[in-house]
Image (spheres, helix red, strand yellow):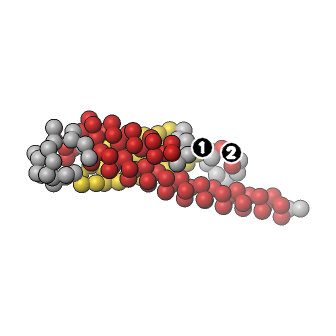
Amino acid sequence: MIVAPVVIVLILLVLAAVRHTVGSNRVDQAALVAVRAASLERDSDSARAAAADQAAAALNDAGVTCADFALTVDTAAFDAAPGTPGTVEVTVRCTVDWSDLAVPVLPGSVTLTSTATAPLDVTGERA
């Protein structure tokens, strides 16, 4: 009879590992989509807005619900003169609820973070 609880806990741990892997991949994808959108903009304010919109949409489309969501966009390169090489960097942080797994050894939530970088167009105009 002791075997059943152990098997259930093992199944829940495997489920947690799968959730973590899938969630990490989806946050990675959101960061990539967001940085691509930011890199196509002409100024830092537009880049931040585009990154936020695209990251939120990517997570929503993937079915990821963030209990806490944070987005950081490094747009310092937008201040450089046109023709100057530069990059934009986006960091997406999403805290996912795990309380439904109800395994004492697991935290109630996990924070997934991903950072992506993309080059800015050196031939385009910057505002």
Q: Nearer the viewer, residue 52 or 104?
A: 52
Q: Position of residue 23 (x, y in %)?
A: 53, 53
- Left or right of 95, for residue 48: left
Please state which amino acid type lies under the numbered disc 1: Asp
Q: Nearer the viewer, residue 60 or 27?
A: 60
* Residue in view at x 62 percent, y 46 percent: 98
Q: Residue furthest right?
A: 1
Where is 59 relative to 119, above or below?
above
Tag 2 near tag 1, CB within 8 Å: yes
Quadrant where the image shows the C terminus: top left
* Residue in view at x 27 percent, y 48 percent: 39
* Residue in view at x 28 percent, y 40 percent: 47
Where is 1 relative to 108, above or below?
below
Visible residue check, residue 113: no
Name the quadrant containing residue 44. Answer: top left
* Residue in view at x 50 percent, y 38 percent: 68
Q: Nearer the viewer, residue 17 or 107?
A: 17
Please state which amino acid type lies under the numbered disc 2: Asp
**Dot 1 lies on which element?**
strand
Residue, disc 2: 100
Question: Between marks 2 and 1, how big is the CA–CA gap?
Answer: 8 Å
Residue, disc 1: 97
Q: Position of residue 99 (x, y in %)?
A: 66, 44
Quadrant where the image shows the N terminus: bottom right
- Left or right of 70, for residue 49: left
